[in-house]
Image (tube, grey):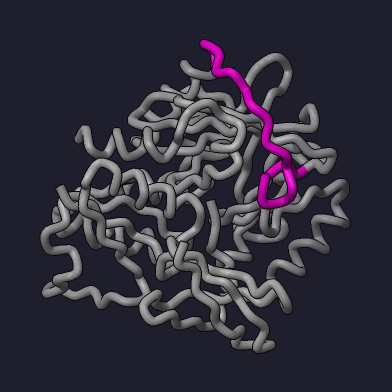
C-alpha cells in the first residue's frame, strides 16, 4: 500500500503520521501542492492507493480533493465531506436539519439583512467567516452599531467572502469548549479547551485538558460524522443548557494538544484506520 | 545524533537542524526568531517560511 500525504507544511501532526506509517512499513509520498501541476496527464498520484489530506491551505486542499475525486483516487476525507465541513453555512444548516443541536445561525448577503438577522437572534451575537479556522476574524458583537462597524471593516478587506455575513447566537459557555477526535466514524479521544477568553481555540491560547468520552458525546459525534460523511474529524462542541451544541467539524484536525493530554496515540489510530481500508 | 548546523538566512545566527528533520518543516532561529522552511535536508536548504494565509487552519 502506498499512501499520499497531501501537505505543504510538516507540522508535528504530519511528522507523527509519517513515523507511524513507517513503523508499519507503509510507503508514503508527501504531495506538496506547491510542487505539483494538475492536468489530465498528472502523474504525481500514480501508484498512490489513497491520499490522506493534511494540507493547511483549505482552498487548495478542496480543489485537489475535487480533482482526485474526479480522477477516481480515494481520499480521506472525501472532497464532498471536506467541502461540506469547510463551509459553515452548509454544515450548520445540514446538521440543524438533521436534528443535531447547533447555535441559532443566520446568513445574510447584505448589511441591511444582516442587521435584521442579528435582531432576530438577539444581541450579543458572533460573526464568523463562512470559511475559516483558528478563531480568525471571529467577533463578538454587543450592539447594532458594533455590527455596522464590523461589517464595514469586513467589506473593506475586499473579496466577496467578506460581504457574506454568518451570524450566530453567542453561547455563554463555561470557559471551555470540547474537541472530539473521530476516526473511522468512532470518537476516540476528547479534550476540553479552557480559557478565560470567550474564544477557547488552542490557536487563541485555549489550554487542553483531558476529557473522558461519555455516552452522550459518543452518540452525538457518531451522528454528526454520519450526517456529514466524514471519516476523520475534529468535532467542536460546547456545553449549553445541559446539552451539547455543535460549533463546527474540522476535516484536517490538528491534534498536538490532544495528544499531550490523551491516553491514546492519535497518529497511530489514524494510520491503523487508513491501513484497515 | 547527526544534528547539523546552518546559518540563519536573516541574522546569520547558528541554527541546529535535528537529524530527523524533514523537508517541509518550519524551524525557528533561536537568535532572531525568524521562521524558516526546510526546503531540503541533504544538503540542508532553508527559505523564509510561508506567511500564514487567510484560509490556513484546522
* Image location of residue A25, percent across then percent down: 21, 46
* Image location of residue A167, percent across then percent down: 67, 47
Q: Would you place residue A85 above or below residue B28 in this image?
A: above
* Image location of residue A101, percent across then percent down: 57, 25
Q: Splitting the image into 4 quarters, where does residue A239 fall?
A: top right
Left or right: A186 in relation to A196? left
Please name whichever residue, B45 or A247, is drawn nearer the observer in this view of the structure: B45
Work out whether residue A121 can be spotted: no
Work out whether residue A16 can be spotted: yes
Q: Residue at x 59, y 53 (%)?
A: A133
Left or right: A167 in relation to A224? right
Count numbered badges in the picture: 0
Q: Is residue A205 part of the magenta span, yes or no?
A: yes
Q: Residue at x 42, y 78 (%)?
A: B39
Residue furthest out toward the top: A215
Q: Quadrant of the C terminus of chain A?
A: top left
* Image location of residue A90, percent across then percent down: 47, 44
Q: Residue at x 82, y 41 (%)?
A: A124
Q: Would you place residue A1 above or below residue A243 in this image?
A: below
Please name whichever residue, A70 or A97, is drawn nearer the observer in this view of the structure: A70
Please name whichever residue, A63 or A21, is drawn nearer the observer in this view of the structure: A21
Q: Is residue B11 part of the magenta span, yes or no?
A: no
Q: Which segment did they paint magenta?
A: A199-216
Q: Splitting the image into 4 quarters, where does residue B7 fall?
A: bottom right
Amino acid at each position: 500500500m502506498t499512501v499520499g500525504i497531501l501537505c505543504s507544511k510538516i507540522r508535528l501532526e504530519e511528522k507523527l503520521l509519517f513515523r507511524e506509517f513507517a513503523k508499519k512499513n507503509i510507503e508514503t509520498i508527501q504531495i506538496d501542492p506547491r510542487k505539483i501541476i494538475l492536468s489530465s496527464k498528472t502523474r504525481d498520484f500514480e501508484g498512490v492507493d489513497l491520499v490522506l489530506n493534511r494540507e493547511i491551505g483549505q482552498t487548495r486542499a478542496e480543489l485537489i480533493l475535487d480533482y482526485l475525486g474526479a480522477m477516481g483516487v480515494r481520499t480521506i476525507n472525501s472532497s464532498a465531506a471536506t467541502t461540506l465541513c469547510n463551509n459553515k453555512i452548509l454544515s450548520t444548516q445540514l446538521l440543524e436539519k438533521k436534528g443535531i443541536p447547533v447555535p441559532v445561525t443566520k446568513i445574510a448577503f447584505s448589511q441591511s439583512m444582516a442587521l435584521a438577522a442579528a435582531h432576530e437572534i438577539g444581541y450579543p451575537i458572533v460573526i464568523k467567516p463562512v470559511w475559516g479556522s483558528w478563531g480568525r476574524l471571529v467577533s463578538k458583537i454587543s450592539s447594532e452599531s458594533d455590527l455596522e462597524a464590523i461589517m464595514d471593516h469586513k467589506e473593506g478587506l475586499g473579496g466577496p467572502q467578506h460581504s457574506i455575513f454568518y451570524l450566530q447566537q453567542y453561547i455563554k459557555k463555561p470557559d471551555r469548549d470540547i474537541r472530539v477526535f473521530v476516526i473511522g466514524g468512532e470518537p476516540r479521544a476528547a479534550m476540553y479547551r479552557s480559557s478565560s477568553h470567550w474564544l477557547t481555540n488552542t490557536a487563541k491560547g485555549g489550554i487542553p485538558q483531558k476529557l473522558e468520552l461519555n455516552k452522550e458525546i459518543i452518540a452525538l459525534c457518531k451522528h454528526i460524522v454520519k450526517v456529514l460523511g466524514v471519516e476523520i474529524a475534529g468535532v467542536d462542541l460546547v456545553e449549553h443548557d445541559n446539552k451539547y451544541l455543535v460549533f463546527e467539524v474540522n476535516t484536517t484536525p490538528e491534534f498536538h494538544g490532544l495528544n499531550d493530554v490523551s491516553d491514546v496515540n492519535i497518529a497511530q489510530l489514524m494510520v491503523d484506520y487508513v491501513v484497515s481500508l | 545524533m547527526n544534528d547539523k548546523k546552518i546559518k540563519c538566512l536573516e541574522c546569520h545566527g547558528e541554527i541546529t537542524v535535528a537529524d530527523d528533520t524533514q523537508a517541509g518543516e518550519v524551524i525557528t532561529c533561536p537568535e532572531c526568531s525568524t521562521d524558516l522552511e526546510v526546503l531540503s535536508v541533504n544538503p540542508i536548504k532553508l527559505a523564509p517560511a510561508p506567511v500564514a494565509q487567510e484560509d490556513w487552519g484546522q
